Amino acid sequence: MQTERTGTEPDLHGTAGAAVITGGTGDLVAALDIGGTKIAGALVDLRGGIIASARRPTRAGESGETVMAAVTEVLDELAAHPAWERVRGVGIGSAGPVDAVHGTVSPVNIPGWREFPLVERVVGHPTAGGLPVVLIGDGVAITAAEHWQGAARGHDNALCMVVSTGVGGGLVLGGALHPGPTGNAGHIGHISVDLDGDLCPCGARGCVEMLASGTSIARRALRDGWRPTGDDTSAAAVAAAARTGDPVALAAYDRAAQALAAGIAATATLVEIDVAVIGGGVAQAGEVLFAPLRARLAEYATLPFVRGLEVRPAQLGTDAGLVGAAAAAIESLGLRPRAGQL
């Protein structure tokens, strides 16, 4: 564990839809970022500074209890840090959908978790010791982080997305984080953009996630004839090939960009956002993704009130989910520092 980054006071205006169980003392929060590939945890101060971190693989294809065991290991490692005694509560950003009202999660990319009582299990574990727990979706978490400290800061209406093993998102509307009643508002990965597309694990067809996730990009490239130079068949390897001009790799990213553009434009048309922030592993492809995304967005965002929509890369990198989960906990538990304490 080590110091990783520092931040500033959260600029949030409520987290309606977050599941909260109360109690605790101190000046830190613990944060969990749960996705289909990894489970990360951190101790975070009230300015968003990460002072300690832990990480385990999700092993999403195994049983729900195996995944929960990884969560427990992350919490146990954090609890071993001397600063744990200062923790006031736990913020969780989980792959979705989530049910923040009942504290359960049903991540599309973690088959062993269906209506899994995550909040109850965290509260009941000896490590957490009955601390308050706040649950939000991972897309809402990255949105909270980027609006607080990143690329959406200063924007009153924004969509922030994580494009990785899955595709999630969250909204800032009227200057406030807008998770919705159950914590799933802005879940752009499951907007259908191809009516005759492949069946998604969520049950619908042609979802953005089925076209734009890292897994989908790699699968499409392989299906269309791309072959890696080694054993790496990840989306990152496809991006590397695209940078050399490989036409199949470029086409796979263009297709992903088209799906993202369609979903972003639909969202902007519905709620009038002025910026879309893209983070997650796929966004690390840089201009391999963002150049076709901007071009495709111009084809979809055609009405006058959405033509000025800007697409930006996220600024917080792999810390975003943790910082966002912490921000939601800080806000929901009333832990925002007074101005004189900054």
Image (cartoon, rainbow, N blue to C red):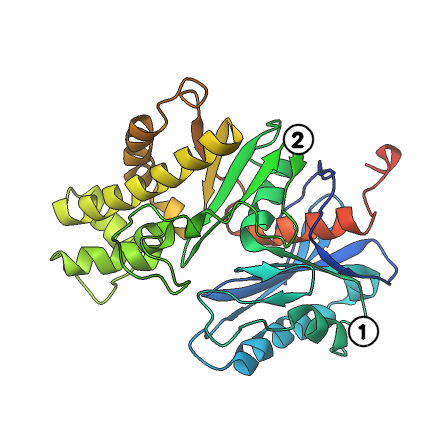
Measured as percent of width and height from the top left, residue 108 is found at: 45, 65
Q: Is residue 214 left or right of residue 176?
A: left
Please tell me the numbered disc located at residue 192.
none
Depth check: 214 or 236 in front? Answer: 214
Please tell me the numbered disc located at residue 129.
1
Measured as percent of width and height from the top left, residue 205 is found at: 33, 56
Q: Is residue 269 left or right of residue 21?
A: left
Q: Is residue 151 visible?
A: no
Mark 1, Cα crowd under 10 Å, few <14 / some 14-19 / many 20+, is few
Is 106 rendered above or below residue 213? below
Q: Residue at x 83, y 47 (%)?
A: 334
Q: Is residue 252 left or right of residue 206?
A: left
Between disc 1 and disc 2, the foreground one is 2
Looking at numbered disc 2 in the image, what kind of residue is underneath it?
A: Gly
Q: Residue at x 44, y 66 (%)?
A: 109
Is 101 rendered above or below residue 279? below
Classify the position of the N terminus by image quarter.
bottom right
Depth check: 151 or 182 in front? Answer: 182
Q: Work out which residue is located at the far top of the displayed protein and give it.
A: 304
Q: Secondary structure at mark 1?
A: loop
Q: Secondary structure at mark 2?
A: loop
Looking at numbered disc 1 in the image, what kind of residue is underneath it?
A: Gly
Q: Residue at x 49, y 71 (%)?
A: 58
Among the 4 quarters of the image, the one containing residue 33: bottom right
Depth check: 90 or 196 in front? Answer: 196
| Residue under numbered circle 2 | 175
Classify the position of the C terminus by image quarter.
top right
Measured as percent of width and height from the top left, residue 339 is found at: 85, 33
Using the numbered discs, state the Cα–Cα distance from disc 1 to disc 2 in whole angstroms.
34 Å
Q: Is residue 125 visible?
A: yes
Among the 4 quarters of the image, the one containing residue 171: top right
